[in-house]
Image: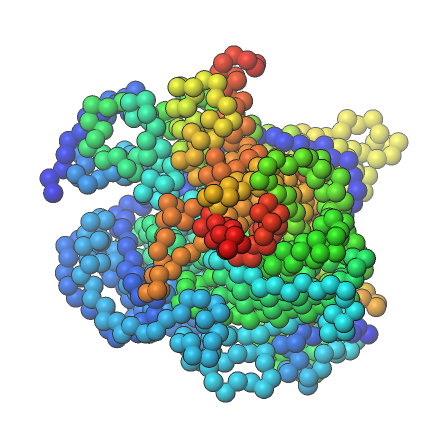
Amino acid sequence: MSFDATFQNKRFNSVGTRPLRPDGIDKVTGRARYGADFNMPGQLVARVLRSPHAHARIKGIDTSKAEAVKGVKAIVTAADMPDLTDGDEALFAILDNCMAREKAMYDGHAVAAVAAIDESSAKAALKLIKVDYEVLPHVVDVDAAMMADAPVLNDTIFTQGVEPAPSKPSNVANRSEFGHGDVDAGFAKADIIVERSYKTEQAHQGYIEPHACVASCNADGTADLWVCTQGHFVYRQNCADLLGLEASKLRVTSSEIGGGFGGKTHVWAEPVALALSRKAGRPVKLIMSREEVFRASGPTSATSIDVKIGATKDGKITAAEATLRYTSGPYPDMWAELGAMTAFAPYDLENVKTVGFEVVVNRPKVAAYRAPSAPMAAFAAESAVDELAKEIGMDPVDFRIANVAKEGTRSSYGPVYGPIGIGPTLDAAKAHPHMSAPLGPNQGRGMACGFWFNFGGQTCTDLNISADGTVTIAVGTVDVGGSRASLSLIVAEELGIEYSDVKAVIADTSTLGYNDMTDGSRGTFSTSMATISAARNAIEVMRQRAAIMWDIPLEHIYWEDGHAKAAGSKHGNRAPLSVKDIAAEAGNTGGPIAGHSELVADGAGVSFATHICDIEVDSETGSSRVVRYTVIQDAGKAVHPAYVEGQYQGGAAQGIGWALNEEYIYGDDGRLQNPGFLDYRIPVCSDLPMIDTQILEIPNPNHPYGVRGVGETSIVPPLAAIANAVSNAVGLRMSHIPLSPPRILAALNAAKT
Amino acid sequence: MPAIAVSTTINDDTVEFLCQPDETLLDVLRNRLGLMGAKEGCGTGDCGACSAIVDGRVVCSCLVLGAEAEGRTIETIEGMANGNELHPLQRKFIEHAALQCGICTPGFLMAAKALLEVNPDPTETEIRFWLAGNLCRCTGYDKIVRAVQDAAAEMRGETA
Amino acid sequence: MVEVKLWAGLRPLADNQSVATVEASNIREMLRKLEERYPGLATPFRGQVAVAVDGVIYRDDWSKELPEGAEVMLIKRLAGG
């Protein structure tokens, strides 16, 4: 990488301020256009037929009656989406998930789709599609799926990562192991050992905007896709690969996105919409209903985790061990592995071992959800850490500080840490007034730490300077929470111009180079890096133009405070040239002025947070209420602090919902019983208090401004923080997330008898 | 089915449209009238993203039939600003960073407007319970509540 | 010379070694030389690996220099939300 991303300490003018977001007016007036807010001439309406069975062989699909419905223009099944994946298992899983081939693998799995002139014709046609199912035994529970007598979902899955290789297929796709030292020797040195089992239920990202797209395929092989996505370039590649299109002929435009949280990193409906459009020869609009979003789009894993931690009486952890079982839906992935890597990441452990088991079940294909897999692992580990502190008689914060990882610590997942921020978040928690505030009756306080890897990735920015000196930037990561504001601040900072003189837009796939998915907390981290690089390239151009305007050698010109200045006594009396001055002359000094950057942003650095929460439990009903919540997290450098706070608060709220209420509930028939916001209850306004935030700024050495990703880590600690708070409030250790009223009440009643 | 002719008032304009008997007001607004500020997040009245004000009362437009609009007075997000002059709630939502993705924002603004019309000085608890029918997955509601409090204070003339 | 630690899943493809020593100045050279020595690594090296250099994870920047004495580990390429 030619761009030097090393952190340079400097005073900021724009970065760190809180200007109004540039897309604010569109979003408060209803003008912002999301996935469902776009239409094309002659557009058809698509609807998807989904399996009512958790596991069934598809013996045949008869679409003849449906095709005869007036207004129906195309029907597609797996037969219309031939397998072009050429042995790529991950891509095949996406294809099979978009449209079931030999078997329906979960309740809600797509089996056919219709495009018609209106919704009523499409719905009428769906009812007339006859699918001949042979219902097969199913399994949805992670522990049940691992039993020897469990129905095997896929007889080509032989557990990887075990010696000797198994001779029989099973639902355990792989085993992964991390750690160092000798845990048996470590436990032998422990004075006290806590050993517990935990479960967490499957949660959904719960973005308010259902998946929606408009697809238009032309007979000449060109195509357009308008879609809400976290990564239009990745969607383009996936759709092109699955449908045999040429990537450059498929233009994907990212609409405003109504929440993603990892759930819009994955195609579901988009290849189907394109296939329908190709067959019908007309544009097709496909919007998933909320029920379809729950039944068929990416939830997180359900888990079952065993943890064993030992410590000496003076509070030093001698060994930590965890076995983590994660569901991945019907297709193997690496969710358990991520859990195994993250579980003990906050701690400096001499002896640590984590083992992950990836388990396939008849549930929807798991998609990333904000720091995927880390919240469940942290729930188990941080619950056990808390219990151990209590048994030793140490304050939970002091116990964590006594064992905290720091620069030079070998992480539980392998590498040795560079400078990291977990210690400072714990110190801040210890000093925070929340920690010492009095508790009311029936209230308990809990705290917990969280860790997440952050990522960078391939990134582009085009920066164009208009003749009036105002600037547009076109970027390829989508704006999921205010990044156009933070990137405009970056341009203002780097060029020394006003924030209001910058306009940031999200470019489509035909107008900018490839950008990776907007995931891994990388939006502002990566694109700010590319934007700084693009701005510096534009400054180089402006220096050249200043040299032409002044007719002096380039090396006599330097850039400072947003101006080209002439160096040395010979030119010292020239008034500096502003961006506007130089831009005004661009037409006669060489044409339009721009700066571009294409780079790989790497070195995102890991991220840590500590959360504190107070909970009040009603022992008669088992219902609980968060009465105070504090988030402390390292941001490296908060570019737009209001939106950093927003990430902290939003992640905490999602974690609170997961911890207290949200869960997929399956019937014995393997059907999802609560595919709606009434019964899958995400936190509402009256459920929550204000969420206090404390932003720590420990510069990331691998970003010019010290920026760290902030999007994901805030969902990691809440499950544990809340479980610890509830456990302290009721005097019972709660080990099954969510801690819904029935579950708390059952624990209270069991303790009475 | 034969279409139904409906005459109604939307954002102070007289509007006439034809709709099917089973068509929701939300579908009419979005698909027939081009008023796409109201969003469908669930279609079952659970998320509030489609909130509109009908005869002064905030409703989920996905639970109202288009035909029921006959003779009513309807307000949608498109009518909230007075031309280029934003309603104080709209301004305060931007100032307080009370939106991230923004998909829920039109619904929250409609609901909050209806609240302040019946209760110009709500407590935090009153705001939280009034807005409990509107889901936001991004913000944790903190900045939304603050924006409503600040807008209410301004509308009462307590701040500049 | 850099010592490269391999994650457990890679070891069967590399003569069951957990550590391999190669002469390499950057990630690209290190991966190329490992692949020359252990051709079985070719498949995981196409899109499935990331490299931790002194604790910082590099997924794509294969020009990253490997300082003398740096701790270098191959880990799985991870996804985020």
From the top left corner, tell me how far across and down residue A671 is, in percent: 34, 61
Report the residue at 47% width, 27% height from top. Answer: B127
Instruction: State which quadrant residue A139 falls in.
Output: bottom left
Residue C68, above or below A346: below
Q: Does residue A610 show up?
A: yes
Please name whichever residue, A606 or B78, is drawn nearer the observer in this view of the structure.
A606
The residue lying furthest to the front in this view is A753
Q: How many badges with numbers are in the image? A: 0
In which quadrant is the N terminus of chain A drawn? Answer: bottom right
Q: Is residue A671 left or right of residue B128?
A: left
Residue B91, above or below A490: above
Please name whichever residue, A135 or A47, is drawn nearer the observer in this view of the structure.
A135
The residue lying furthest to the top in this view is B157
Report the residue at 48% width, 58% height from top. Answer: A201
Please name whichever residue, C43 or B19, is drawn nearer the observer in this view of the structure.
B19
Report the residue at 74% width, 48% height from top. Answer: A395
From the top left corner, tell me how far across and down residue A586 is, in percent: 63, 36
Q: Is residue C81 left or right of residue B80?
A: right
